[in-house]
Amino acid sequence: MQKKILLQFLFIFIFPFISLAQSAAPVYFKGATKENKVKLQRNIIQNTIIKNLSFPLNEDTEEYWMDAFWGMELLLYKSPWSDARIFLAFDSVEKRTAGFQRALLELVYTNYPAQFSKQVSTLLYVTSNAKVFAMCAEYLLVNNKPLLAGINLESKKHVLVKSEKDNAIVRQVMNRLQDQPPARKNNFIAEIIDPDFIINHTILYSFQRKNRNYPGLAMIRDSAGRFVEDEYGSIFSVPQLARSVNNLPGYLTNGNTPQGIFRMHGFDTSTNSFIGPTTNIQLTMPFETSLQHFFMDSSIIDKAWTEGWYKKLLPENLKYYLPLYESFYAGKAGRTEIIAHGTTVDPEYYTGKLYYPQTPTMGCLCTKEIWSEADGKRMQSDQQKLVAALQRAGGANGYCVVIEIDEEERPVSLSEILPLINASKNQ
């Protein structure tokens, strides 16, 4: 018995700080030096964007142009010459592959609001690809809604749905086109943070605004239902951005982080030069992994994901609260590889944006990191703080819940969440 108590003490109080001590060694990313950042930006502009857009557009050069679209999104790059090339791309867009169409639509959603409404509207009416249709519809919903008035949703649905993935995409976009958002539950946040919600499991919460231009807030509840504290005895939190660079809705590839429940299953490090070397937190969505893994239950013999299975994780009063199903439908539509990570993207690309100096991603949860321009040393890392807090909670084994709390136009603050936590303690 004494040995068991000692092991519990070591696991809860000592081992996390050993991990912290090991991670306290300086972390470097050579790409963060001023010289290398200038080189990277110049290379993206000269080679990824200008060189690739200089090729004549045909079936053999589509991939070059698609790479250029990605570079323009990352840097939010525009010039009179590149603008002309984008107009040229739309001249033959109906003849291009669905992959090219999606890449072009993602770019114009990001860099050219309203400028291509007429061209996007034309593509909307002729496409038979569910994802292309959805991206066209989302562009027009934001930039020129009247152009959607003539679409016959039911007849279009029959053309678009060829698979379960298509069905998931079409269901989401149809809900948005019909402009019938679900009524917001008055106490849904209180129910989500209640100690009985996904009881006995560690939960990483990411509280967000509907407008993802404003950073959200990451907090952690341990398996005993207690919110993790920082070294000063206050409840731990760090800002966290759930915005993709294109700001598309979460059911679409590369869109914002979808709301809902994710399985959290450990730490990892990345070799991706835009994520960087700081430890990341691994997440998976429904359909991306098995029921056995998602529910941490090897006795499950069912192989088929259904709403019924996902619904088991939700509180009784929220089983029909549709925003919490976004991760379910994003997974069903084929989204993968959404994780919680730091960043080595140069924040200066986004100077003047509401989320600056945070950097957007391709749809992951992202925390701020500052790297030295002199030698690439990591100077500040909210991601490492988040990882350390998860270690104090017992590790990254449990669930992550992403939830939009309201439509206010400001970053999420701890002062908004604390009263709800205190109220749950006093119940």
Image (spheres, rainbow, N blue to C red):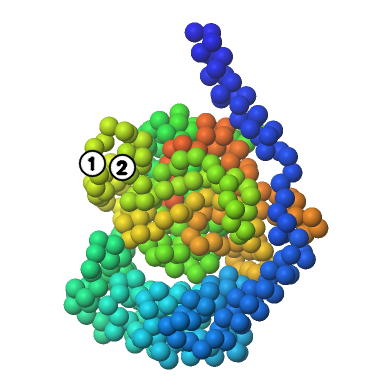
Gap in Å between the C-alphas at discs 1 and 2? 7 Å
- Specify whether residue 298 is in view: yes
Disc 1 marks which residue?
A: 302
Q: Which mark is residue 82?
A: none
Residue displayed at 64% across by 62% down: 345
Mark 2 crowdedness (10 Å alpha carbons): few <14, some 14-19, many ≥20: many
Q: Which of the two residues, 5 or 70, is positioned nearer the viewer here?
A: 70
Callout 1 environment at 10 Å: few (<14), some (14 to 19), or many (20+)?
Answer: few
In this view, the residue in front, 89 or 246, is 89
Does residue 369 sit above or below 147 in this rendering?
Answer: above
Q: Nearer the viewer, residue 307 or 30?
A: 30
Residue 113 visible in the displayed image: no
Horizontal and vertical percent for residue 36?
74, 65
Q: Amino acid at mark 1?
A: Asp
Q: Amino acid at mark 2?
A: Leu
Residue for point 61% across, 30% down: 16
> In terms of image quadrants, where is residue 151?
bottom left
Q: Determine whether the residue tagged by mark 1 lies in a helix, strand or loop.
A: loop
Please state the horizontal and vertical placement of residue 288, each as a whole percent of the image: 36, 51
Q: Are marks 1 and 2 in contact (CB under 8 Å)?
A: yes
User: Is residue 377 found left or right of 49 in the rendered image?
Assistant: right
Tell me the residue that label 2 is attached to: 291
* Residue extending farthest right: 374
Instruction: Indicate the secondary structure of the residue bearing disc 2.
Output: helix
